[in-house]
Image (cartoon, grey):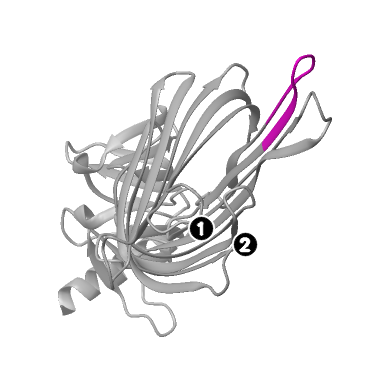
Amino acid sequence: MRYVCLSVVLSGLWQCCSPAFGDVMFLTNGDRLTGKIKQLTDGKLVFESDVGGELNIDLSKIRTFSSDAPIEVHFSDGTLIKQAIVSGAAPGRIGIRATGTLTAQEFDLTKITSINPPAKPTPKWHGAVSAGFSATQGNTSTERQNVSVDTSRRSENDRITVKADYALGKQEDPDTGEEKTTEDWWRTRLKYDYFVSKKLYVYGDSRYEKDSVAELDRRMLVGGGGGYQWIESDDMSFSTEAGLASLYERFDNQTGSNTEVSVQLGYHFDKKLYKALTFINDLTYYPSIGDFTDYYLTSTAELRASFLKSMFANFKVIFDYDATPAEGAGNTDVKYMLGVGWSF
């Protein structure tokens, strides 16, 4: 240890007393380069050589190096140093000088994961907004409109998702002129995921929906649990989740309400089928803990076709199944939405 510390100190003194030559790179083949250490990522060090210009050097080909100014060095064990570097006492080593309360130290060159890594991008909101409208006049008079919002913000440690859908449809009786509402519903969802590792995360989410035609005054779901992000890339994403949820339902044509605790099982999948065509699908299943035959299931499938840089056309299908719906209402609701949207 004394020898190591002495070597680092002597190396530091030599650099302090020598003329400034910039950063110095010593390669395993015996070459010595002077210039500027720019960055190291994925085992490749970018070095601006005084003679050869910008070079990309494999970390395995570097014997040691030194810098005349502080650089940011990250190691595989989580160690981070922001100091001028001195050459190590032995091949495959680098060191730092004793400064203030810090003692001279040496580090294994092969344990470096990055040098001067680029700043992590600030998390931004991304998503899409779409809307559709249709109308008929003549023997029948109908009008329908729908709006969808799907946004998310992903950082290294968490993810926030906000979704909303709305549709209103009306039809006029040609004989009486009376207008009848054929569709009037909306739903929202807010979800937060916190990644405890690169793949594993815990989540909390809430849903709220209304449907006047189905006599649904409100349905509220608040739940949480754990999930696993199996795939997350530009072309494909797939995750599965399991947890518990509290489900509250109230119907317009019934007195009282229903509250129960349910298991919450689900998945999310999206895949870029072609350059301009994306398929998006999710499903969540809520069986009651007290009676597994009493359950609520909701699923969404969407095809999104881009025709400009940020414009697209989409077709969305929403499938809901409630084992205990309002009196006189069916168990199944299938909603179709066709629109044009803007992505950001």
Residue 13 makes an appearance in the image: no
Vertical position of residue 8 compared to residue 317: above or below: below
Q: Amino acid at mark 1?
A: Ala
Q: Secondary structure at mark 2?
A: loop
Q: Position of residue 197 (x, y in %)?
A: 30, 61
**Could you tell me if the residues under marks 2 and 1 are in contact, i.e. CB atoms within 8 Å?**
yes
Q: Residue furthest front?
A: 175
Q: Within 10 angstroms of label 1, few (less than 14), some, or many (20 or more) residues?
A: some
Location of the N terminus by quadrant is bottom left
Q: Residue at x 45, y 18 (%)?
A: 275
Vertical position of residue 340 compared to residue 214: above or below: above
The numbered dot on residue 326 is 1
Q: Residue at x 26, y 44 (%)?
A: 26
Corner quadrant of residue 79: bottom left
The CA distance from mark 2 to mark 1 is 8 Å
Disc 2: which residue: 252
Corner quadrant of residue 29: top left
Q: Secondary structure at mark 1?
A: loop
Prevailing secondary structure of the magenta residues: strand
Give the residues drawn in magenta, as a range. Answer: 132-146
Q: Residue furthest bottom?
A: 101
The numbered dot on residue 6 is none
